[in-house]
Amino acid sequence: AAVKAAAEAAADKALATAKGGAKGGKGKSKAAAAKEAKAESAAAAAAATPAAAAAATPVKALPAVIKLKDYACPADLEVFGMERLRDELTAHGLKCGGSLAERAERLFLLRTKKVSEIDKKHLAKVAAK
């Protein structure tokens, strides 16, 4: 509640400043001043909320190559998303369908086993020629 109040106070101050600047004849139109005030209030609100601050934090880039030994459990692989896991599974000859969790579990099998050691139910079917 205090964060919201601080953001509203900053928005009010920015709007008052913008209105005063437009009346003072500093070369800004009322529309430009209002637009600037709105941008300032949005920036103040974004900086005031913890969720927005977390969203503004740079996201760590995902590695180009998935090294399974770097991940402790299948859930850790879910950050790669459906498409990336599908591509990895396909490259290893494993089934690539299912939910995100199922794909991560299937790929995680390769952490301790070779493709030849994995149960056949996880292998992709070879298309008949």
Image (tube, rainbow, N blue to C red):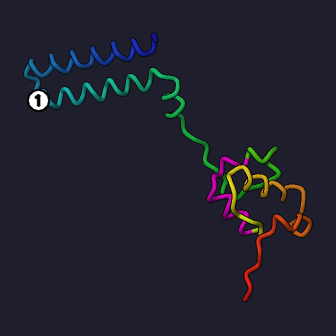
Q: Residue at x 67, y 62 (%)?
A: 86
**Magenta region:** 77-91
How many numbered marks does the figure carry? 1
Q: Quadrant of residue 111?
A: bottom right
Say which element carries label 1: loop
- Residue pointed to by mark 1: 29
| Residue 38, position as x, y percentages in the image | 27, 27
* Residue lying farthest to the right in this orientation: 117
Q: Residue at x 45, y 14 (%)?
A: 3
| Residue 57, position as x, y percentages in the image | 53, 34
* Residue lying farthest to the bottom in this orientation: 129
| Image-based side of 108 in relation to 38, left or right | right
Residue 40 drawn above or below residue 60: above
| Image-based side of 83 in relation to 52, left or right | right
Q: Residue at x 73, y 64 (%)?
A: 89
- Magenta segment includes 81: yes
Residue 10 drawn above or below residue 92: above
Magenta stretch, main secondary structure, is: helix
Q: Amino acid at mark 1?
A: Ser
Q: Considering the image in quadrants, where does the C terminus appear?
A: bottom right
Q: Residue at x 30, y 29 (%)?
A: 39
Residue 67 drawn above or below residue 75: below
Residue sitting nearer the eye, 29 or 120: 120
Circle 1 crowding by C-alpha within 10 Å: few under 14, some 14–19, many from 20? some
Residue sitting nearer the eye, 27 or 40: 40
Q: Quadrant of residue 85?
A: bottom right
- Magenta segment includes 116: no
